[in-house]
Image (cartoon, helix red, strand yellow):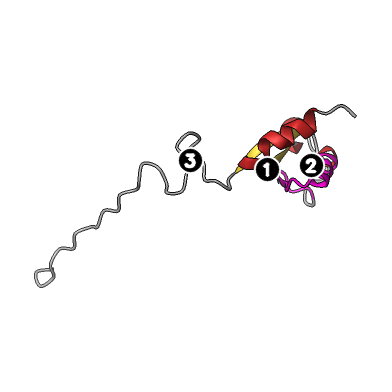
Amino acid sequence: MSGMAARRARIIRFPARPRGTAPATGRPPGSLVEARRCRDQAEALVVRGLLESEGIEVVLQSRLAQSVYPFSVGAQAEVLLLVAAADLPRARVVLARER
């Protein structure tokens, strides 16, 4: 160690707010937000079809891999329907309609 100089660590500072985020929400412009929470995958697929028929793109998110665990107990089967933050007001109007 006598011949080697001690290396100093380089510190990388993170910005307080990531670039490209809206100051009011703190979210990136194309970020996904929760539009609805469904009991199971079957309900989520029906609601996704409704939203997509209105031109709103939807992403499903679940804690449970349906192909591995075909059954569930309680809130394990919950599926979140995520939409772009810009589409959220329109998605709420579509979901609030009575059929």
Residue wearing tag 1: 83
Residue that appears at 18% across and 63% down: 7
Q: Position of residue 18 (x, y in %)?
A: 42, 46
Q: Nearer the viewer, mark 1 or mark 3?
A: 3
User: Would you call the spot at circle 1 few (<14 residues within 10 Å), some (14-19), or many (20 or more)?
Assistant: many
Residue wearing tag 3: 22
Please identify the quarter of the rendering in which residue 75 is found.
top right
Residue that appears at 10% across and 73% down: 3
Residue that appears at 80% across and 52% down: 67
| Circle 1: residue type | Val
Disc 2/disc 1 C-alpha distance (Å): 9 Å
**Quadrant of the snapshot with the C terminus:** top right
Please identify the quarter of the rendering in which residue 87 is found.
top right
For residue 26, above or below residue 59: above
Q: Of marks 1 and 3, which one's residue comes earlier in the chain?
A: 3
Q: Position of residue 89 (x, y in %)?
A: 68, 34
Q: Which stretch did the figure color magenta? A: 45-66
Q: Tell me the tag on residue 51.
A: 2
Q: Is residue 7 left or right of residue 88?
A: left
User: Would you call the spot at circle 2 few (<14 residues within 10 Å), some (14-19), or many (20 or more)?
Assistant: many
Disc 3/disc 2 C-alpha distance (Å): 25 Å
Tell whether label 2 touches label 3 (CB within 8 Å).
no
